[in-house]
């Protein structure tokens, strides 16, 4: 049932379908009880939309973490980016060095973001697959282009109420099907 708490679209589409069906029934029968049923469907849909907004799932938390990293990259806030990376991450030094060498103008997580949560591990882990887009300048002048589009596979671990990056691969890490 997480489909109803991760996106408003399933509840909205279900409401539209039910309202159309009830409208057809009302047009054929003219019964007032159908109008009451239409009101009940609208009320239930409104309640579902409120729940969707208030319940934050682990998948949404991971998405928010990745969006926060992209925003910190855009702001060239190296401290915020590094705070989102676990101290145990084997690529922490590489990330720190890369952040010192670039000035970023824009960064985004692609719409193709796919998050897989594993609650069987302790602590819970997640793997995110997406296309990352970064526009920036190499301060050393060794890279001649300013637009970077890469496929990413990011591994995260839940520590307390936060998700931290524990590892990442770029280029074409391969997305399992």
Image (cartoon, rainbow, N blue to C red):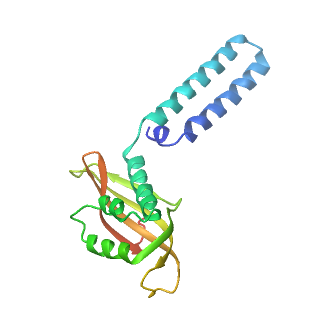
| Number of marks in picture | 0
Residue 40 falls in which quadrant of the image?
top right
Query: Which quadrant holds the N terminus?
Result: top left
What is the x, y in percent for residue 47?
52, 26
Q: Is residue 159 above or below residue 16?
A: below
Q: Is residue 47 above or below residue 137?
A: above
Q: Residue at x 20, y 50 (%)?
A: 122
Whether residue 92 sits left or right of residue 36 in the image: it is left
* In-front residue for pair 59/102: 102
What is the x, y in percent for residue 132?
48, 67
What is the x, y in percent for residue 28?
78, 20
Whether residue 131 sits left or right of residue 118 in the image: it is right
Whether residue 140 sits left or right of residue 36 in the image: it is left
Q: Is residue 159 above or below residue 1?
A: below
* In-front residue for pair 65/8: 65
Q: Residue at x 56, y 27 (%)?
A: 46
Q: Is residue 14 above or below residue 59?
A: above
Residue 93 falls in which quadrant of the image?
bottom left
Residue 89 falls in which quadrant of the image?
bottom left
* In-front residue for pair 13/133: 133
What is the x, y in percent for residue 13?
62, 37
Which residue occupies the extreme top position in the image? 32
Whether residue 12 sits left or right of residue 88 in the image: it is right
Q: Residue at x 46, y 58 (%)?
A: 71
Query: Which quadrant holds the C terminus?
Result: bottom left
């Amino acid at each position: 049932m997480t489909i109803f708490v991760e996106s408003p679209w399933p509840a909205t589409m279900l409401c539209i379908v039910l309202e159309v069906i009830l409208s057809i029934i009302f047009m054929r029968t003219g019964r007032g009880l159908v109008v009451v049923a239409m009101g009940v469907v609208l009320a239930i849909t409104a309640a579902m939309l409120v729940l969707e907004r208030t319940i934050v799932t682990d998948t949404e938390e991971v998405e928010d973490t990745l969006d926060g990293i992209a925003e910190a990259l855009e702001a060239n806030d190296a401290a915020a980016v590094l705070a989102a990376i676990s101290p145990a991450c084997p690529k922490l030094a590489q990330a720190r060095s890369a952040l010192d060498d670039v000035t970023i103008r824009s960064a985004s997580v692609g719409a193709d973001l796919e998050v897989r949560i594993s609650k069987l591990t302790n602590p819970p882990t997640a793997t995110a697959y997406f296309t990352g887009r970064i526009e920036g300048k190499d301060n050393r002048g060794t890279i001649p282009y300013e637009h970077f589009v890469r496929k990413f596979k990011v591994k995260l671990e839940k520590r307390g109420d936060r998700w931290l990056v524990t590892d990442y691969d770029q280029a074409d890490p391969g997305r399992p099907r």
